[in-house]
Amino acid sequence: MAVGLGEVLWDLLPGGKQLGGAPANFAYMMALLGHRGVVASRVGEDALGPELSARLRDLALDASCLQADSRRATGTVKVQLDRAGQPDYQITEGAAWDFLEWTGEWQHLAGEADAVCFGSLGQRAEQSRITIRKFLRATRPTAFRIFDVNLRQKFYSAEVLRESLQMSSMAKLNDHELPVVMQELGLEYREERGAAARLRSEFDLKLVCVTRGEKGSLLVTAEGHDEHPGFAVRVADSVGAGDAFAAALAHHMLAGSSLCAMNAAANRLGAWVASQAGATPAADPTVIEIVREDSPERR
């Protein structure tokens, strides 16, 4: 079971609205890779809330742990794309997902999870931050806890970054976020690989991943590192590509794959999503099969 924990919302893209929120995107990609994808979030009882719940079910995601809020609106994000398909986000504040509640149902879900993905944005409000921490503490020691950093606007702090890393198995961030995170934590940044290794050691993480957009990625563990140059694709938009990347990493971590195979699979899935419109494109069976079974020989 793979849980996307935190924000779920509608991305208001130039071409119309699409399901969004990094945790929900992660859960969808994990479902495509053969896992039970569960979204643990909160929506309003406005018109957008039931529509979002229905969309999750259409995508074969488990929405049984989606909370309903009678006082706050379903989350939305206005997304503007530049000429290269890179997104700029304007995120509505005070949304339903800012008020996640810790319940017995969620405690049970945490205890069953094999992988949980969460980020800094979902913790911008105190109530959700407290709930997310309780959820992570309630997971089994063997559960894979992925901190997909996702720095957005002003919605992060050194405290959130530090405590999230302390509760994680893996950290994923991009090459622009890494220097910011190191500075926030008071850690020296000289060059990328050394900084990633320092971050991994400082918080006793199993894996640190640094994504580089179309230039691939760097993976660092205690035993070594692996770099992948990425796959060249025609970019439709990059919304959700990083979430797909995180899902492929989680899939192969749970499978016990090599670092090289894991990196190749993550880059392949992320590149495929970037070549599609939106974060939750319909499955391409050929791509999914290759990602699920990726090996160094198929790089």
Image: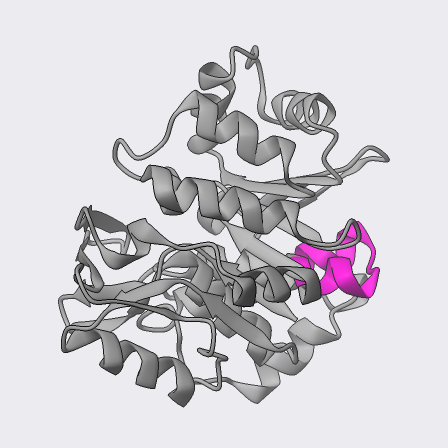
Q: Position of residue 283 (x, y in %)?
A: 49, 84
**Residue 172 appears at what percent x and percent y?**
56, 43
Magenta stretch encompasses residue 256: yes
Please state, as top left, top right, bottom left or bottom right, where the C terminus lies in the image.
Answer: bottom right
Could you tell whether 281 is left or right of 143 in the image? left
Look at 66% across and 43% down and name the residue there. 170
- Please provide the residue range marked out in magenta: 250-264
- Residue 102 visible here: yes
Which quadrant of the rendered structure holds the N terminus? bottom right
Residue nearer the viewer, 245 or 76: 76
Q: Residue at x 77, y 37 (%)?
A: 221
Residue 69, placed above or below residue 129: below
**Relative image position of residue 226 (x, y in whole percent):** 73, 42
**Residue 205 picture quarter:** top right
Q: On the rendered structure, is 189 left or right of 249?
A: left
Q: Is 33 colored magenta in this rendering?
A: no
- Against 105, is 213 above or below? above
| Residue 120 visible in this rendered orientation of the protein | no
Question: What secondary structure predominates along the stretch shown in magenta?
Answer: helix
Residue 56, by quadrant, is bottom left
